[in-house]
Image (cartoon, rainbow, N blue to C red):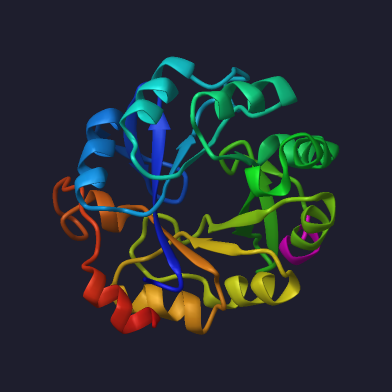
Amino acid sequence: MLRTRVIPCLLLRNESLVKTVRFGRFGYIGDPANTCRIFNELEVDELTFLDISASRERREPNYKVLSEIASECFMPVSYGGGISSLQIVENVLKLGFEKVILNTSALAFPNLINEISKSFGSQSVVVSIDVKANFLGGQQCRGLSGTLNSKRNPVDWAQEIQKRGAGEILLTSIDREGTWSGFDLELIRQVSDAVTIPVIANGGAGTIRDIGEAAKIGHASAIALGSMVVYQKKGMGVLVNYPERSELERVLN
């Protein structure tokens, strides 16, 4: 059993899976339900789905797609995108999702974190912190798929959302996302060391070694993978896959 979770993080756009680079241009990956079936066969422990357009389009989640995903997944699955009220949280959890993920709504209405934690338990709420460096090199939290600059410091924001009842943090470096260039280890370490709740490192994984470094140097509690689990290799075609357990054990245990 791996001590560190390694979680495929899949991006929804309309009713399809896509993969972005630095939250910008994207490529088509495939059908969500079919992809779930492949990950079932690969015996993945956990999955995350993020709808990258729901908040920008000011709409609720696509419950039809989420229902199809939940019916196919044999593992725990979390969802983020368009989560803006307790009723939406209840709708998603009732479909069979274990956790909801907040980003834009948490930045705009931080008390929603408290409300979800009190109503459904802290284990059900993950707050996504999307971080981008400004022209001076400072790191700032972003919302609306990276287009809204909250000007919040990621460490300060992580500590606040922990106090408000978040059970986990999904920490993404926008500058590294989809680049295969490795994680922002300094960012991960700063946030992980500032809180006691689990931090899931996301954005930049390109090799097995990167996964180990995020855990051992960055002190991440879990690792999210995007490009590595939907492409054969950098610059090559779509192939839904998952690292060999023996390789993960070698770098994580």
Give the residue at x 37% y 54%. 45
Residue 148 visible (yes or no): yes
Does the magenta-highlighted stretch encompass residue 153? Answer: yes
Left or right of 167? Residue 208 is: left
Give the residue at x 53% y 22%. 61
Q: Position of residue 52 (x, y in %)?
A: 49, 34
What's drawn in magenta, residue-wise?
152-157
Q: Position of residue 32 (x, y in %)?
A: 30, 31
Q: Total marks drawn?
A: 0
Q: Quadrant of residue 16?
A: top left
Left or right of 183? Residue 160 is: right
The quadrant of the picture occupied by the N terminus is bottom left
Does the magenta-highlighted stretch encompass residue 28? Answer: no
Q: Quadrant of residue 140?
A: bottom right
The quadrant of the picture occupied by the C terminus is bottom left
Residue 31 visible (yes or no): no
Q: Nearer the viewer, residue 16 or 136?
A: 16
